[in-house]
Amino acid sequence: MAYLQSLGLRPRDVLASIIRRHPEVLLQDVQCGLEPAVEFLRLHLGLDARNVRDFLCRCPEVLTRDAASDLAPRLELLCGVGLEVGAARKLLFHDASLLTGDLEPTLQLRLHFLTSDCDLSPDQALQVLRSCPDLMSFKVANLRRKWCFLKERMSGGNEQVLEYPQFLTKNLLLQIGPRFAYATERLGLHLSSGSGRSGPCAEGTHALQAASSHDSAS
């Protein structure tokens, strides 16, 4: 406990947020276990002292993982598929489960969704993941619901996913649905296929952007 308090953690945080949730932390050697894990957060994820404390309170399990054989390879895996180091660090900081869960199956399931459901090529799927790493934090069932809405209600397709992959990270009930309804009903945009072409017409594409744009008014 003394080492954890030396990081600036309050005694009640050490007890309530770390020890009670993962008592096995007490069995970790400071020099061989705790310090390397904390150094990984500092050096490899680039966290300052405040964010280290925040991360440990959110995900104390990281203190039970081996920095060299378990934590570092996860960052390397994300960078290995083309994510920029900064984007990979940000993803792991905001979604701590990726540092303690089964990262490789999680990655493969997202890529399979993009190639199977969205009919993207493997290279295109990697391109989407590089453009929007936050996709890793969403369950496939959640992504699939938004893909179905895009395809069935908005007459969209994989071209829109390639153009704006962040669409799949938006909240379907609070963002996509209401904004799409506003775009089609209030702005007078209509979805239809024109001149025998499949997929959304120009107006449908505008509706898609209005529905999913991060900068649109809620």
Image (tube, rainbow, N blue to C red):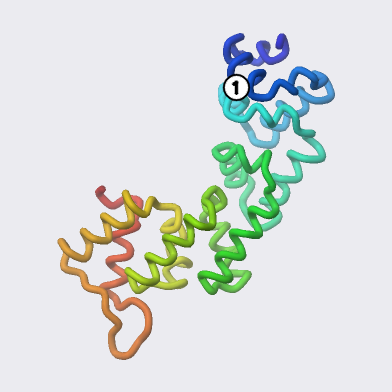
Residue 170 locus on image (x, y percent): 40, 52
Q: Which residue is mark 1?
A: 53
Residue positioned 65% across, 16% down in the render: 7
Residue 154 locus on image (x, y percent): 33, 69
Query: How many labels were placed on the picture?
Result: 1
- Which of the 4 image quadrants contains residue 32? top right
49 in relation to 111, above or below? above
Q: Does residue 152 appear to the left or right of 118 in the view shown? A: left
Mark 1, Cα crowd under 10 Å, few <14 / some 14-19 / many 20+, is: many
Residue positioned 36% across, 54% down in the render: 172
- Which of the 4 image quadrants contains residue 11? top right
Q: Does residue 45 appear to the left or right of 176 in the view shown? A: right
In this rendered view, identify the residue nearer to me: 145 or 112.
145
- Looking at the rendered structure, the kind of residue marked 1 is Arg
Taking the view exactly as shown, the residue that stands out farthest to the bottom is 196
Residue 156 locus on image (x, y percent): 38, 72
Residue positioned 81% across, 37% down in the render: 68
Q: Does residue 148 appear to the left or right of 103 in the view shown? A: left
Query: Is the N terminus in the top left, top right, bottom left or bottom right quadrant?
Result: top right
- SS at badge 1: helix
